[in-house]
Amino acid sequence: MAERSLSRRAGLIALASTLTAACSPLSVFATLTPKDAARREGRGARYADGPRGGLDIYAPPVAKGPAPVAVFLYGGSWNSGRREDYGWAARAIAAQGFLTLAPDYRLYPEVKFPAFLDDCARAVRWAVDHAAGLGGDPRRIVLIGHSAGAYNAAMLALDPRYLRAAGVDPKVIRAFAGLSGPYDFLPLKGPVTQQTFGDAPDLAATQPVNFARADAPAAFLATGDKDTTVYPRNTRKLAAVLRDKGVTVEERHYPGLDHAGTVLALSRPFRGKSTLLADMAAFLKAQTA
């Protein structure tokens, strides 16, 4: 049994080392990795029309009154990703005591900035409308994202126009957590950002760092010191401008973690490599108490 367990862990590590925007190795990881105890309350609930307008719902294993609500936004360079491959991450967050929603959202080339932000805002609206019936508190919502999803979470938290357009009071967002997020990436250099953001009439309005404000939600900003995909300077810059405005910020730089490592740290096989999940959960619980 011990040899089988070690062999399985070795296989998961090998798979994880190849995680990129491609969903095939991630799909295998999502299938094989051990899952946290959480109750799946819904699969494919519709917050918008179209094939990308669904979300999955996970609840804490034990109900202790209305739970704070987490909306988890996966990454994938705004051109890939699907919620089915991140159920393990949503379960991990739910096991920490959050009613957790994992929505899909439209991707490039179907859409460009800011349409995917509009989708994420509609998913938050769905949470506001339905959380109470699922055991959650729609007045205590947090946004969590990794990579491109961290960008989406930051933009919704910092630029209130997207939530307001979806009919959501921005004050229901108590905090957001960004894992390895791109927050300050002008000028546009790579093909991904040029394709996704290049047509925006005001490029400055695409950058989360430009929307820091004194009444912004508290922020948990984490990165790995080995990240060469989205450099840690993004985390340092957003943390600094938010602090300058007086916003509560917890900034974490985790030794040895690369870009994929910060989201893999939510999974059971890789939780021992850092305290990221416990740190993030403690911060978000404090902001939603």
Image (spheres, helix red, strand yellow):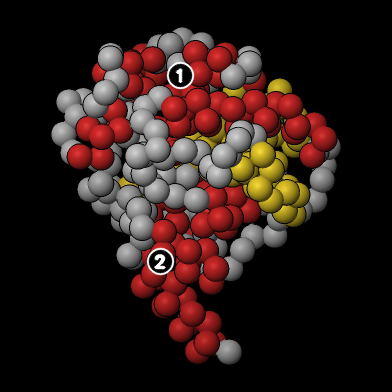
Left or right: residue 87 versus residue 129 is left
Query: x, y percentage for residue 171?
Result: 61, 15
Residue 88 seen in render: yes
Indicate the quadrant containing the N terminus: top left, top right, bottom left or bottom right.
bottom right
Q: Nearer the viewer, residue 1 or 172?
A: 172
- The structure residue drawn at horizontal position 29% and vertical position 20%, both measured from the top left corner, is 200
- Give me the C-alpha separation between circle 1 and circle 2: 33 Å
> Which amino acid type is marked by label 2?
Pro
- Report which residue position mark 2 lands on: 25
> Which amino acid type is marked by label 1?
Leu
- The structure residue drawn at horizontal position 64% and vertical position 34%, both measured from the top left corner, is 47
Left or right: residue 198 versus residue 104 is left
Which of the 4 quarters of the picture holds residue 72?
top right
Residue 100 seen in render: no
- Report which residue position mark 1 lands on: 158
Query: x, y percentage for residue 204?
Result: 27, 16
Above or below, comparing residue 24 to residue 87 in the picture: below
Above or below, comparing residue 49 to residue 118 in the picture: below
Above or below, comparing residue 27 to residue 6 in the picture: above
Indicate the quadrant containing the C terminus: top left, top right, bottom left or bottom right.
top right
Of mark 1 and mark 2, the one earlier in the sequence is 2
